Amino acid sequence: MPRIRTVKPEFWEDELLGVMPRDARLLFIATFNMADDEGLLRWTPAYIKAQAFMYDDDLTIAGVGKLMQCLTDTGLVFPYIGGVARQQMAVVVNFRKHQRINRPQKSKLPPPSLGNYKVREMYARRDGWICQLCGNEIPRLPMANDAHNLSIDHRRPVSAGGTDHPSNVRAAHQACNQSRRATPDGEEFVPPRSLAGLEDSLNDALNRSGSGSVNDSVNESHANVNFEPETDTHSEISSLNHSLMERKGKEGNREGKGTPQPPSETSSPTVVQTGERAIEDRMTAAFLDRYRSGNAYSQRQVRKVIADALANGTAPGELWNALERLGSLSKPVSAGTLQFAFSELRKPPSNVIALPGQPLTGTDAKVAGWMAIAAQLRQEGDSA
């Protein structure tokens, strides 16, 4: 693997990596060298052991497998089965964001299949759930017969020799993807008129993720927290939709087609608006009401972190405890700091006995404490 790779200084400050074992961090750096110019590499414990830990006799193949699982659980590496030989492969998700490749070479390894929704979802997470064609958000929950659902666009079409490798694919709306395919070569891409229903689709997705047992769980776990609705989120979404509609209206008038109309009922999502505020909005409002004073918290950032955590299956009660910990320490709310808070909350209770007396410090305090405990045990034995 004679490849020159770089490690950014921010690597050592990343809080998500900071809570991982040191060997796992070393393995993540090793993936930069083992991966090809597309970020693909073989992903078997025996191969990783031979490549990255060949001189570490104290680390077994099973131990290497646990380190690999640590990287996949945190989403840094995405494993898959590829090729006719059904080999165990993996892709370093944000490889091209962290590595500047000079004169990239074509990959000899098979890419993950785009027919798998988990693969498409991985690319959407890599691109921040933002359509790379129109620049608007992609709903995280797929809706039936909705043009805003996740799709994968090829930068270079397959018909022109493009491949399914990570550098050639990007997340997009289904409508944007279809519109780009229909755009003649050389002409500027214009977002389709069907995006006029973006706000309704996003609201339905939010209600779907916040309905049912999730709301009940939060209400039971935190009955004393007042999750009151907040108008800022609605105004942000309305502002986004207003600007989107205004831009599409101008484009429609330019084309002589008039103002775009909302999608017909036949293309509406199967999930209906319930009128109840989504759980991520209520948790965001409660958190900002309690901790925004004196802190530079961004409502959009906090809500995004909360929504992502809930979408990954995090229990609302545990998520709120982690948010309270971050707010009480005035720490920023991000995926990394949230992971750090979870690691602190999930630590097993300490079995260290508090040492009596405070004047002594260091070794003297420990010796004195254990002598006092031994005397107490002897006294209890004599009395028995």
Image (tube, rainbow, N blue to C red):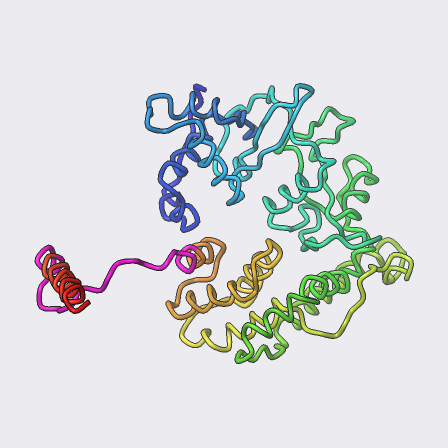
Seen in the picture, residue 188 relative to 101 is either above or below; the reply is below
Total numbered labels: 0
Seen in the picture, residue 11 relative to 85 is either above or below; the reply is below
Question: Residue sitting at 47 percent across and 62 percent down?
Answer: 333
**Along the viewing direction, whichever of 87 and 348 lies nearer the viewer:** 348
User: Residue 237: x, y in percent?
Assistant: 68, 67
**Along the viewing direction, whichever of 232 and 240 lies nearer the viewer:** 232
Question: Residue sitting at 80 percent across and 60 percent down?
Answer: 196
User: Residue 28: x, y in percent?
Assistant: 44, 35
Instruction: Say if the magenta span includes residue 365.
Output: yes
Q: In this view, does 207 lie to the left or right of 263?
A: left
Q: Main secondary structure of the magenta part?
A: loop
User: Residue 282: x, y in percent?
Assistant: 60, 73
Question: Residue sitting at 65 percent across and 51 percent down?
Answer: 130
For the C terminus, which image quadrant? bottom left
Question: Residue sitting at 43 percent across and 19 percent down?
Answer: 2
**Along the viewing direction, whichever of 109 and 316 lies nearer the viewer:** 316
Seen in the picture, residue 136 relative to 210 is either above or below; the reply is above
In this picture, which residue range is highlighted in magenta?
Answer: 343-366
Q: Is residue 47 left or right of residue 239?
A: left
For the N terminus, which image quadrant? top left
Instruction: Say if the magenta span includes residue 130.
Output: no
User: Residue 332: x, y in percent?
Assistant: 43, 62
Quarter assignment of residue 118: top right
Quarter assignment of residue 113: top right
Question: Farthest residue in the front direction?
Answer: 384
